[in-house]
């Protein structure tokens, strides 16, 4: 595992994986620059848009940090200023780095940016794109999963909890399956390492609610209660 490097200029701080990027290109965080220079490969839909790019022979995902809830309606992306190491981008970068040292299937962090502006800051993170993978929500929109795959999802969540990682937004869009059947967990914004506690059950409850919500919204969503039992069987292993 390579040691993260850091550059600072005019208050902006960027940490990056020096093993993947021999030199850091600050414009990687600019979608317009990516388009103009042939690195942009597309973007996701939805409120929190992500951009897909290719750079240094690696497929990556750029995500800008947005506010949610009522606050997000009036302030989309400004956060109260703090030191770069306490910013949402740096915290997620460092947490992903830690989880990968523990052998967890999470995206490789590529770079994170902290950009202060007066009393506030904006933030971005770039991660390596998981090849040939789709979200659990997308997969279940096409076909049901086998019990062994539900077991594997439960095992992946248990490994996360054994490493004391609280995924505060564990839902069926933050779980991915690649074409080899490997379970990946993504999007660790506002997540942290914590002592064991009720939050572990809260993670599971949040995932179950997201599955029920999508099932209630679409008759073509392939999820039934016995699938949850299979997940819990894997979690208990």
Image (cartoon, rainbow, N blue to C red):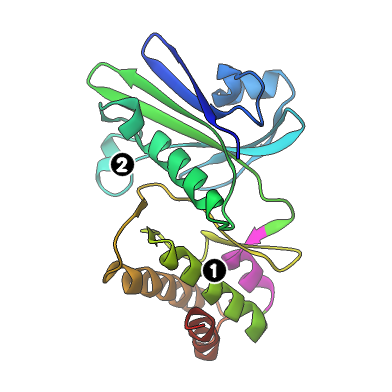
Using the image as rendered, state which of residue 164 and residue 221 is in the foreground. 164
Q: Rounded to the nearest whole Å, what is the CA distance between mark 1 and mark 2? A: 31 Å
Quadrant of the rendered image containing residue 218: bottom right
Where residue 43 sits: x, y (%)? Answer: 62, 40
Quadrant of the rendered image containing residue 8: top left
- Circle 2: element type: helix
Does 43 sit left or right of 79 as displayed? Answer: right
Q: Is the stretch drawn in magenta largely helix, strand or loop?
A: helix
Q: Which segment did they paint magenta?
A: 134-143
Q: Which mark is residue 72?
A: 2
Quadrant of the rendered image containing residue 126: top right
Can residue 46 be seen here? Answer: yes
Q: How many marks?
A: 2
**What residue do we see at 31% from left, 58% from top?**
194
Judging by the rendered image, the residue that carries numbered circle 1 is 156
The mark lying in front, picked from 1 and 2, is 1
Is residue 138 found inside the magenta-colored segment of the image?
yes
**Residue at the bottom extreme?**
226
Is residue 207 found inside the magenta-colored segment of the image?
no
* Label 2 crowd (10 A; few <14 / some 14-19 / many >=20): few
Image height of 109 relative to 205, above or below: above
The disc, 1 or 2, on the residue closer to the chain's N-terminal end is: 2
């Amino acid at each position: 595992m390579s040691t993260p490097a850091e550059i600072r200029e005019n208050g902006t701080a960027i940490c990056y994986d020096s093993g993947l990027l021999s030199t850091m290109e600050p414009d990687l965080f600019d979608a317009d620059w990516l388009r103009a220079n042939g690195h942009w490969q597309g973007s996701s839909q939805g409120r929190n848009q992500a951009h897909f790019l290719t750079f240094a022979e690696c497929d990556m995902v750029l995500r800008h940090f947005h506010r949610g809830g009522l606050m997000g309606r009036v302030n989309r992306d400004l956060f109260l200023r703090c030191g770069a190491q306490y910013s949402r981008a740096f915290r997620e970068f460092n947490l992903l780095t830690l989880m990968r040292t523990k052998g967890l299937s999470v995206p490789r962090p590529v770079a994170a940016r902290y950009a202060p502006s007066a009393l506030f800051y904006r933030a971005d993170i770039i991660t390596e794109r998981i090849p040939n993978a789709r979200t659990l929500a997308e997969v279940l929109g096409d076909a049901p999963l086998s019990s062994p795959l539900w077991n594997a999802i439960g095992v992946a969540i248990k490994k996360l909890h054994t490493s004391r990682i609280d995924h505060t937004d564990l839902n069926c869009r933050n779980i991915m399956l690649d074409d080899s059947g490997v379970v990946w967990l993504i999007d660790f914004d506002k997540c942290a390492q914590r002592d064991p506690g009720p939050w572990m059950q809260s993670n599971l409850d949040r995932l179950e609610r997201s599955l029920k919500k999508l099932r209630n919204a679409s008759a073509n969503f392939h999820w039934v209660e016995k699938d949850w039992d299979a997940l819990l069987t894997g979690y208990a292993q």
